[in-house]
Image (cartoon, rainbow, N blue to C red):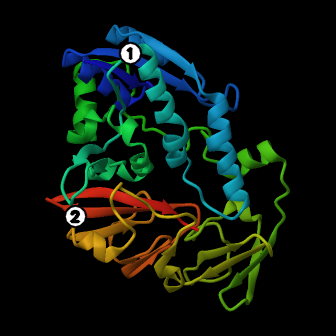
């Protein structure tokens, strides 16, 4: 079989390329160049060529700067300036990465696109459904089904994707790469946001927009004045550090009011909610309707996750643009995503999700 491997030069994509070659497949490495800040991030490192030479594999560099800026960076900036905390990786997977990789696959006449995501792909052929989706990988801590959930809307693309890492633990992969003496830094992990290498979001946004970030009031949930904030861009929901409040009590950001330039803080209980409203119609696997009773007729239990590393919690009610949890969930954050999972045959399977409003 002929595989395109999305290749960043990191631990995971390097292992995927090596693994598929060891299995006897033809492999073409494809790096998506999304340079935005010249000489600061996402340039083409020499390591890419060093590793591709080590593997004896061809490397194709594809410039996706224009699409990446339009669909990922501009959206990231706009979301933050509207008081939301976006997840750019989800946006990239939906709008840029997999569409372009599949297009390249078609152009070169290859069979599959493989990436170094930790996720199990499967075809659901029960519950009276026939659809491609994802299940949680063997390495639960590294699982990326949350990041890929929106791909369920591209059933034609999913037919041509492969995620070989689903059955591996990250520790196993590092050991294999060390044993094979790969020129890869196995201690280095990928960054949360690839286009902001220093993780200084306010600096990046100010440089790109020249927006003014005035200081303002920090108030509690009863509107009592507590202190001054340094600019709302520096804060996110459930943040505790950096508030500089003159109190020994633990206080968290519970709301960011951009209209009035207010940072609202409260206790842990003020972060707890059961109801999650969506900014869009709930995205579900083809054949499912946004009605929990209808889903429960086919599936035993439904769970939700409101952030990438958050725990799954059971769902009590589902409508087209709202989900109600059975128990309280902590820190529902506008701009993040709610992802729904079903427990079926001892696996947790992605059935849908949506953007939190």
Decide if residue 218 is on the left or right side of residue 107: right
Image quarter of residue 250: bottom right
**Mark 2 nearby-residue class (10 Å; few <14, some 14–19, many ≥20):** some
Decide if residue 140 is on the left or right side of residue 198: left
Instruction: Name the foreground residue: 211 vs 279.
Output: 279
Mark number, residue 121: none
The residue pinned by badge 1 equals 109
Q: How many marks?
A: 2
Q: In the rendered image of this protein, does residue 244 appear above or below residue 62?
A: below
Mark 1 falls on what kind of element?
loop
**Mark 1 nearby-residue class (10 Å; few <14, some 14–19, many ≥20):** few
In the picture, which quadrant includes the C terminus?
A: bottom right
Instruction: Name the foreground residue: 322 vs 87.
Output: 322
Report the residue at 59% width, 56% height from top.
Answer: 86
Report the residue at 38% width, 34% height from top.
Answer: 187
The residue pinned by badge 2 equals 343
Decide if residue 4 is on the left or right side of residue 104: left
- Disc nearer the start of the sequence (1/2): 1
Report the residue at 37% width, 42% height from top.
Answer: 155
Image quarter of residue 326: bottom left
Mark 2 falls on what kind of element?
strand
Report the residue at 26% width, 44% height from top.
Answer: 120
Q: In the rendered image of this protein, does residue 54 appear above or below residue 330?
A: above
Alpha carbon of mark 1 to alpha carbon of mark 2: how far?
37 Å
Q: Residue 272 appears at what percent x and percent y?
A: 48, 81
In the picture, which quadrant includes the N terminus?
A: top left
Decide if residue 129 is on the left or right side of residue 227: left
């Amino acid at each position: 079989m002929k595989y395109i491997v999305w290749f960043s030069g990191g631990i995971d994509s390097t292992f995927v390329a090596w693994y598929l070659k060891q299995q006897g497949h033809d492999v073409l490495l494809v790096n998506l160049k999304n340079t935005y800040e010249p000489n600061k991030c996402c340039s083409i490192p020499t390591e890419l060529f060093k590793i591709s030479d080590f593997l004896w594999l061809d490397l194709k560099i594809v410039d996706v700067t224009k699409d990446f800026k339009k669909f990922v960076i501009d959206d990231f900036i706009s979301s933050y300036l509207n008081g939301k905390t976006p997840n750019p990786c989800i946006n990239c997977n939906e709008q840029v990465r997999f569409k372009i990789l599949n297009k390249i696959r078609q152009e070169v006449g290859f069979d599959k696109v493989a990436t170094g995501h930790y996720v199990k792909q499967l075809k659901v052929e029960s519950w009276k459904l026939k659809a491609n989706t994802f299940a949680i990988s063997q390495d639960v801590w590294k699982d990326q089904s949350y990041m890929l959930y929106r791909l369920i809307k591209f059933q034609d693309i999913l037919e041509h994707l492969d995620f070989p890492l689903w059955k591996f633990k990250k520790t196993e992969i590092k050991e294999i790469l060390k044993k094979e003496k790969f020129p890869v830094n196995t201690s280095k992990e990928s960054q949360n946001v690839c286009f902001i290498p220093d993780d200084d979001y306010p600096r990046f946004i100010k440089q790109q927009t020249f927006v003014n970030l005035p200081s303002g009031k920090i108030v509690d949930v009863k509107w009592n004045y507590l202190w001054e904030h340094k600019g709302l861009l520096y804060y996110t929901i459930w943040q505790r550090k950096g508030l500089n409040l003159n109190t020994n009590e633990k206080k968290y950001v519970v709301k960011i009011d951009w209209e009035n330039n207010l940072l609202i803080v409260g206790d842990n209980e003020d972060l707890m909610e059961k109801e999650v409203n969506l900014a869009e119609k709930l995205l579900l696997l083809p054949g499912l309707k946004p009605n929990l009773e209808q889903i429960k007729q086919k599936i035993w239990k439904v769970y939700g996750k409101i952030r990438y590393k958050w725990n799954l919690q059971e769902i009590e009610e589902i409508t087209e643009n709202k989900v109600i949890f059975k128990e309280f969930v902590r820190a529902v954050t506008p701009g993040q995503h709610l992802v729904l999972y079903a427990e079926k045959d001892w696996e947790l399977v992605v059935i849908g999700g949506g953007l939190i409003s």
